[in-house]
Amino acid sequence: MERMFSTPAETAKGLLDVGKAKGNLSGTNMILLGILAGVYIALAAQLATIATNDMGALYGDGLTRVVMGVTFTLGLMLVVIAGAELWTGNNLMVPAAYTGVISWGQLLKNWLLVYFSNFLGSLLMVWLMAASGLWQANGGAVGARALGIALGKVEISFGAAVARGILCNMLVTLAVIFALAAKDIAGKLWGMFFPIAAFVTSGFEHSIANMYFVPAGIMLTGDAKIVELLGRDVSGLTWGSFIANNLIPVTLGNLIGGAVIVATGYYLIYIKPSQTKQTPAGIGMR
């Protein structure tokens, strides 16, 4: 019987083909696909916000986190199945650069264009949500929930944000690996479901998701009704606090978790040993 999934070693080698394809994209396609990924992740973020807008008072923190995690799984599913370029997932391009399948310049070009394009897509969704009026739903509770999420993210200490970023992108890149290992769409969807639900439920931090969550909150600080409904001081929620307290440390943590721990780990365990066996004595690796 044919296996319905690839082995870890086979999947690790598949990362080289994926990295090559991503590294050889045109700059225009990197930008367009990056914008789409920002939109897709933000679509999941707004869904999670609306689904949990009044759950805390009714069912407590734990169940609220679970529902938020389950609904947020939509984001990576859209990225992988519909096709888009997500910076956190593209941390898995590192093995292709280690082996010379792509250059480090190609990798950095992809990362920079995709990261900032993800930001553009996220901000587009912030604008669309503001235009939709949906933050006023349930008497403004949806907006208060969005504002509370954003405020909580800028109040995390730098070290905690790095640690939560590491843990988050370990799970995100593993979700991508699960999807790559599966050979049918059902397997890919279920493979992504559990790691993504786990990172959101756990409270880990995803830099691209935060490009929607926090700017949405910043925009909502100008809505007196929603600020009053939240009942908290929101003066600390600014673009400066977002970048310094959340985006920089979370991005750093995501890079460590995805590129260093998972991607480099898979390279050292599954790819480098097979390359060493295939390299004649005296001939250096690329």
Image (tube, rainbow, N blue to C red):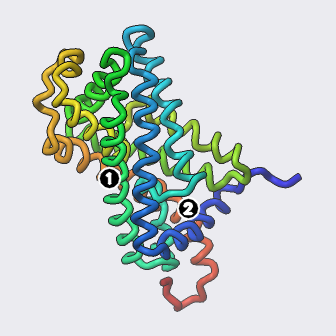
Q: Which residue is mark 2?
A: 269
**Quick one: label 1, few (<14), some, or many (20+) residues within 10 Å?**
many
Residue at point 23% right, 15% down?
229
Q: Name the residue located 63 percent from the left edge and 81 percent from the top edge.
A: 278
Give residue 64's position: percent from left, percent from top.
Answer: 44, 19
Number of residues whose C-alpha sits closer than 10 Å to that of mark 2, classed few (under 14), some (14–19) or many (20 or more): few
Q: Secondary structure at mark 2?
A: helix
Sequence-earlier tag: 1 or 2? 1
Q: Which mark is residue 274?
A: none
Badge 1 marks a residue whose secondary structure is helix
Residue at horizontal 45%, vertical 32%?
47
Q: Quadrant of residue 117?
A: bottom left
User: From this viewpoint, which residue is outermost toward the left?
Assistant: 235
Residue 277 or residue 146, whichever sits in front: 146
Q: Give the left or right position of residue 164, taking residue 63 as reference.
A: left
Pinpoint residue 8: horizontal percent, then vertical percent: 64, 56
**Would you place residue 160 above or below residue 15 in this image?**
above
Q: Which mark is residue 119?
A: 1
Point out the residue furthest to the right here. 1
Residue situated furthest bottom in the rendering: 282
